[in-house]
Each structure stands twice: as structure tokens, then as C-alpha cells.
Image (cartoon, helix red, strand yellow):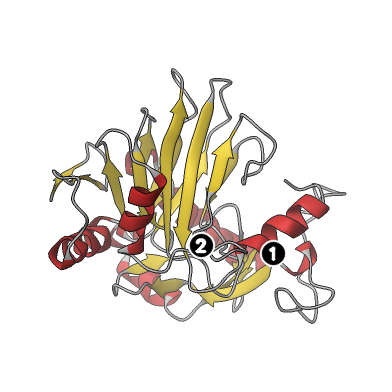
Amino acid sequence: MRITPLDAPFGAQLHLETDDALGASEVDFLRRAFADHGLLLLREGPIDDARQIELLSALGRVEPDETGAPMRMEVTNQHEETTAPDGELVFHFDYAYDPTPIPAISLYGALIEGEVTPTCFASAATVLDRLAPRTVERLRDLTAAHACFLHRHDAPDVRSEEPEPLIPRGEPGWGPAHYWHHHPAILENAFGVESLFVCLQHTDRFDELPRPASDGLLEELFAALYAPAGIYEHRWQPDDLVLWDNLTVQHARPEPLDAPRTLRRYHVSETDLTADYIRVAREQGIM
């Protein structure tokens, strides 16, 4: 097993060089590479579900479905059971609005026909090196509020308001209005890597600042996070497998193309959160 840097601002290509099951040394190598680079690309030819799950399991507990098997999802334009909303998705951490956002995601190019919609990635870890030291120190004293829906569905120009009190996920009465949580502005993952934990899609405000000051600081941070020179645009090829750290790397989907694209997804989570979110989203017509 070895890695080579991507021709990108961050990330690395992982070369397995064998079809054998991962041993302890390979698991350790994969974990170190994941911690160091935040995103790993494999181009080893066809990868079945079992191999994808094995690789991802090196990074943590793969979230199970209701039967106890690893939860298999598809992000696709081929059927209505896709597990992502339609259209463009701006930069985000998955489940930033949950108390326990998932730490790792894997997507495999199961169906890639021609030039399909790319996936774009931005490193919220390396951006800390590009910010002024005084800004980073200021952020250490701040927490940020995150909402799944920053604007109301019935009034897209109206900012959502955080309900009081928040109903915990899964409790009676819980629903999309309660998709909120507060996290440190600088978050540390399980590998000790620090990340600027704010994102365009979900971050509402800094709790300790007045709204105008908060909006101004977020604008400054987003300009650094999403500067074109720091973005990795992954152009999918058949059988690509991408593994990334959802606490240090954000992802986005540009305006979709029509070419057939199905990405097989498994992710790591210490809690079983996805079924609740998908169920409520479909009940509400969100997805």
C-alpha cells in the first residue's frame, strides 16, 4: 500500500496494490494517510460493496440500516430513491446541524457515463494556515450555530429562526424546524486535526457576535475557504472510490449535468442518525 499526492490543493491517491484483505499494518497506513490528507482517491478498478465497507471500516463504525447491515445508499439521477436532494448543493459538512456529524464518507462511481457532474471539495483544515493568526485565535473563543435550512421553504428570502426549545432528534415533535446544533468554530477530529467548522450551506451565525459582525466574519472566512486555488474538483471516472473526512473537508455539487451518474455511498457514524433524517425529509417532500 502506498500513496501519491493528487494534482490538487490537497488529497492523495491510495494504491492498494493487492486484493488481499487489509491487515493491521494496512489499516494503520490507511488511517495515517486519511488523517494527513483528509481525502483519499482509489482507482483500483471495480470495487464491490464488501471491499468499500472493508476500507471504510478502517476509519470507524459504518452506520447500519434497520436490519443491522451496513447502510447502503445511492446518490443518483437514475431513480427517486436517491439519498441527496436534487440540484446544486453548495459547500457543506454533512449533518453539521446534528450533535454528532459523521466523521467519514465514501462514494464509489458505480455508474458513470461520459462527463458527469463533478464533486467539489474544500479543505477546512488547511485553510487555517491561510488565515491571519489573530483571526484563528479569535475563532477559538467562538461557537457557531448550524441549521439544515437557513431559509424558510415557504418564504425563501426569510431567514429561519432557531426554535426554543430545540427538540432532540427522534423525540416526539422533532422535525425539520429542529435541525440545529452549535459547534466550536474550530473543531478537532479524532486524529487531532483542527478544522474551521463553518460552511456556506448550514452555518447561520457565531453565537457570541451580533448578527452584522457575525455575517462579516463569515463572509471573510468563506472567501478564504472557497478561493478557487484551494478547491479540488473531482471529475468522476468509472470505479472511482473517494473517501473523505467530513469534519475537515467540505463537499459541493455544481449544477447537475444530465449524464447518468450513480454514486454508491457508505459512511462512518457512531450514532444511527440517517434513517431519521431521510424519513422526515421524504415525509416533508424535501427529498
Residue under label 2: 198
Q: Is residue 164 above or below residue 217?
A: below
**Residue at 44% over, 17% down:** 114
The one of 179 and 57 positioned closer to us in this rendering: 57
Q: Residue at x 52, y 33 (%)?
A: 262
Residue at point 46% right, 81% down? 141
Q: Is residue 65 visible to us here?
A: yes
Residue 219 in the image, given as x and y percentages of width and height:
53, 54
- The residue that disc 1 covers is 276
User: Where does residue 94 sit, x and y in percent of width and height?
Assistant: 54, 57
> In the figure, 236 relative to 38: above or below?
above
Q: Amino acid at mark 1?
A: Asp
245 lies left or right of 3: right
At a point 50% along the width and 64% down the height, the residue shown is 63
Residue 259 vs 171, above or below: the answer is above
Task: Report the disc number at residue 191.
Answer: none
Picture coordinates of residue 164 (x, y %)? 80, 79
Quadrant of the image occupied by residue 203: bottom right
Q: How many marks?
A: 2
Question: Dot 2 lies on which element?
Answer: loop
Kind of residue sitting beneath label 2 = Val
Occupied quadrant, residue 204: bottom right
- Where residue 270 sits in the image (x, y, percent)? 48, 73
- Whichever of callouts 2 and 1 sits on the residue coming sooner in the sequence is 2
**Residue most toward the top?**
114
